[in-house]
Amino acid sequence: MNDRQISDEFYIEEHATLYALIAKKAIELCGDPGFAAVEEATKLYGLERGGRMAKRALRDGKELTMMNYTQYSEWTDTRGESAGAIESYNPDYITITTRCGWCEAWKKHNLLDYGKIYCQFIDEYLVKGFNPENQLIISKTLSAGDELCHFCWAGASFRNEADYDRDPQGKEGNGRAKHKGFSLSYRASPLRFQPKTHLCAW
């Protein structure tokens, strides 16, 4: 099976469920050390992905600002399993998520208590991996029981939708296309490929 076939088969529900099952088993077997291992692995995973995004931005001659962070996403939900909106373009760029494929999967499989660990750390550490000086302010998350996820990308500001959609290279209409070569099959890796994978030894 090639990468494209894996990507087609392995989507949000599979990723979310795999993550939560690994977290569940680590915590059941090891208690607090298991939770600490899951937390640390998730942080490391976010830092790794954010670092890859930073390398692509630097390759294009871009500064590691929050505005440029929003232009270098690694993955897009092409199936529309999540839904949200842009609440504000300025003075700060603010997004909301009203339906989350990951959260729905955790609820479906009764794994929300374990899956929500992912939400507690992943986006913050993606931003830190891109540039530790950038700040993402998360005031609400669906997995914590809120009615939506509310993210304020501090320091990012756009004049309007057209400005937001501008490509990092200065071309229109391709601003979200920096995720080439990335799939959820790789996204499943936080607890699998990190060093110190012996969870209960922590």
Image (cartoon, rainbow, N blue to C red):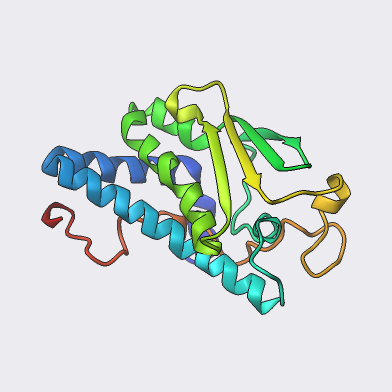
Tell me where residue 7 appears, x and y as whole percent. 52, 56
Position in image of residue 198 (x %, y %): 17, 59
Asked whether the viewer can see residue 100, the reply is: yes
**Closest to the observer, 165 or 22:** 165
- As rendered, which of 176 and 202 lies closer to the eye? 202
Identify the image quadrant of residue 127. bottom right
Residue 110 falls in image quadrant: top left
Q: Quadrant of residue 58?
A: bottom right
Tell me residue 122's x, y (percent): 45, 48
State the residue at coordinates (84%, 45%).
161
Quadrant of image for the N terminus:
bottom left
Residue at 45% of width from left, 64% of height from top? 48
Q: Is residue 132 found left or right of 39 in the rendered image?
A: right
Query: Please, is residue 181 above or below residue 87 in the view?
Result: below
Q: Quadrant of the C terminus?
A: bottom left
Q: Position of 146 compared to 197: left or right?
A: right
Is 153 rendered above or below residue 86? below
Q: Residue at the location (85% across, 67% down)?
A: 170
The residue shown at (49%, 49%) is 124
Would you place residue 199 above or below residue 86 in this image?
A: below
Asked if residue 78 can be seen in this view, the reply is no
On screen, residue 201 versus residue 107, left or right, reads left
